[in-house]
Image (cartoon, rainbow, N blue to C red):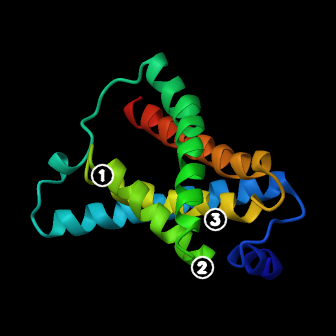
């Protein structure tokens, strides 16, 4: 496991693309959930109206599910690749490229609902790292290393919403 973390930290692709994607899914999901819970608790403890900071509950519709689980990860991953490509001209270290990308994606999502920043920033850090690690192998691998965990994280969030309302 230590070798796996070292490879992940150095942005080196693993031996198995599938294992890396599954690992990234869990790291992104757990980190994002922890950040959202911590942010929610912090804002609630300060007396902020947490309900105003988050997306209002709405019933899940089949169109929304497909958009969040499939379309959004594909479109956002294509844009993620363009953002990382543009940022690469700054000569920042790849670790910092992932940080800047994550902050930009968190800010973009917070535009809609402020608490989304906390759920998004960590996930997009992980997705950016996946892209950067697999980019030397091929564009297809880089795209998949970001899009597959993204789709799995979004699907997990949708399932949590579905079962929370049941």
Q: Residue at x 30, y 65 (%)?
A: 39
Let me know if residue 46 appears in the view. Answer: yes
Q: Residue furthest top?
A: 62
Q: Residue at x 51, y 64 (%)?
A: 31
The tag earlier along the polypeptide, 1 or 3, is: 1
> Disc 2 vs disc 3: Cβ atoms closer than 8 Å?
no
* Left or right: residue 42 compared with residue 151: left
* Residue 110 image label: 1
Using a 10 Å C-alpha cutoff, classify the residue at mark 3 as few (fewer than 14 neighbours), some (14 to 19) or many (20 or more).
many
Q: CA distance from mark 2 to mark 1?
A: 26 Å
Give the camera-side residue of 130 and 20.
130
Q: CA distance from mark 1 to mark 3?
A: 21 Å
The tag earlier along the polypeptide, 2 or 1, is: 2
Q: Residue at x 44, y 24 (%)?
A: 64
Residue pointed to by mark 2: 93
Q: How many marks?
A: 3
Callout 3: SS: helix
Residue pointed to by mark 3: 129
Q: Quadrant of residue 93?
A: bottom right
Frontmost of labels 2 and 1 is: 2
Q: Residue furthest right?
A: 15
The tag earlier along the polypeptide, 2 or 3, is: 2
Image quarter in which the C terminus is found: top left
């Amino acid at each position: 496991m230590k070798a796996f973390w070292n490879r992940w930290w150095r942005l080196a692709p693993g031996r198995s693309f599938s294992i890396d994607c599954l690992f990234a899914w869990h790291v992104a999901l757990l980190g994002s959930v922890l950040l959202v819970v911590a942010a929610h608790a912090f804002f609630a403890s300060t007396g902020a109206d947490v309900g105003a900071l988050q997306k209002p509950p709405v019933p899940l519709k089949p169109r929304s599910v497909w958009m969040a689980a499939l379309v959004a990860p594909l479109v956002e991953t294509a844009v993620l690749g363009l953002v990382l490509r543009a940022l690469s001209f700054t000569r920042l270290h790849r670790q910092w490229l992932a940080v800047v990308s994550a902050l930009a994606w968190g800010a973009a999502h917070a535009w809609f609902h402020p608490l989304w920043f906390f759920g998004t920033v960590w996930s997009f850090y992980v997705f950016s790292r996946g892209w950067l690690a697999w980019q030397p192998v091929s564009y297809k691998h880089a795209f998949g290393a970001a899009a597959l965990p993204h789709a799995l994280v979004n699907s997990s969030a949708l399932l949590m919403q579905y079962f929370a309302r049941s």
